Amino acid sequence: MNQLALFPQSATLAIPDVIRKALSDGATLAISISGGKDSHALLIELSRWFRQQHFNGQLFAIHADLGRAEWPQTPDFVKRICEENDVPLIVVQRAKGDLVARLEERLEATSGTGKPFWPDAQNRYCTSHNKSGPIDIELRKPFWPSAANRYCTSDSKRGPIDTALRAENPVIISAEGVRGDESSARAKKAVVEVRTGITASSTDPIRNLSAMTPAQSLFCQQKGQRVAFNWRPLLYWNEEMIWDSIGTSLAELRERQAMYKAGLYDPALRGWLAHPAYVFGNTRLSCALCVLGSKSDLTNGANHNPDLYRHYLELERAGNSTFKNGWSLSELPVTGRAKELRDEYLSGR
């Protein structure tokens, strides 16, 4: 059975009843945007649908600025698409510095422990809240982010976003451009879930909203309590639907990528509606050099951001830990200025 059929639909958005009820009652809708194609399509589709429904709650977009780790085009691009869709934009940043500063902090904290410091898929301290814990707990974390340790997301994205959302309506919906066909892990995610980090919790089961289902938490909410949801309206969309929503296609992207690769930079980018990194050759948009990125995307990011690439090479050496488990950024087949800086680094200059 197509799970999408379980939800009332508008322009193929997955809209559970609990979301519709919350918005009908005046809940705040915050659209989380990164500049990538999925959140771009989400902004277009959700802002249109929200206005068609004549909800009276607040609507805005929210972007976590990662500073030097971002593609340099991202801040202006995010601002532009919000203006085009007439959606107010809130930009949040980690109070103690950008993501590169966070990596440097992790390097210092793990120095001499033998622990890696990059985040990974299982340890994404790049996305967690900033927490002050015992030093031994801190030192158990690797230096570089990874799939298991994505502190780059938690500290620099989710934490600042949660801080901003706490100041809003007692019922807050954070919409995310997550699609199930991107990975098996994302395919298992729910269309809507309680955002436990900023939803009221209590030792009293009747008041412990963070432990309830979305519908239960909304029903049991009492005065002074906050309820927040993560909502994934595009969970069942495919990539072609995303590009179509933005006003382009995968075929057009391929044509523009070919032009760019051939050195026709201006024609390749002229009139392109999505983030320019896709024309540069990226398959996904996140940090310029993301621990979860493919080698192709990392090579592309390094070639277009050579100074950041050189700095990460220096962090690898200082932390005695490769960017990804088993291989170093120095192994990327970079060209141009990135290759010059890499060769200087390897020769000790």
Image (cartoon, rainbow, N blue to C red):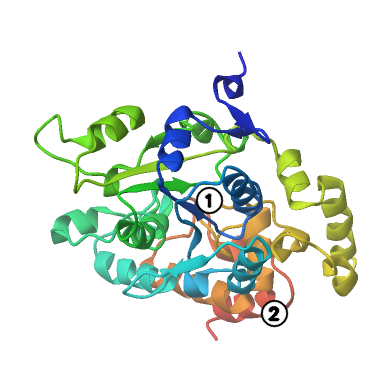
- Is 181 displayed left or right of 129 in the figure? right
Label 2 or label 1, whichever comes before in sequence order = 1
Q: Position of residue 66 (x, y in %)?
A: 47, 68
User: Does residue 119 show up?
Assistant: yes
Amino acid type assigned to the residue bearing label 2 in the image:
Arg
Q: Residue at x 87, y 47 (%)?
A: 251
**For numbered disc 1, what is the local secondary structure?**
loop
Q: Position of residue 45 (x, y in %)?
A: 65, 46
Q: Position of residue 164 (x, y in %)?
A: 35, 62
**For numbered disc 2, what is the local secondary structure?**
helix
Between 182 and 333, the one nearer to me in the picture: 182
- Is 272 displayed left or right of 287 in the figure? right
View extreme (bottom): residue: 349
Q: Badge 1: few (under 14), some or many (20 or more) residues near its Cα, within 10 Å? A: some
Occupied quadrant, residue 73: bottom right
Amino acid type assigned to the residue bearing label 1 in the image:
Leu
- 2 vs 1, front mark: 1
Report the residue marked by disc 1. 292
Between 70 and 174, the one nearer to me in the picture: 174
Occupied quadrant, residue 244: top right
Report the residue marked by disc 2. 337
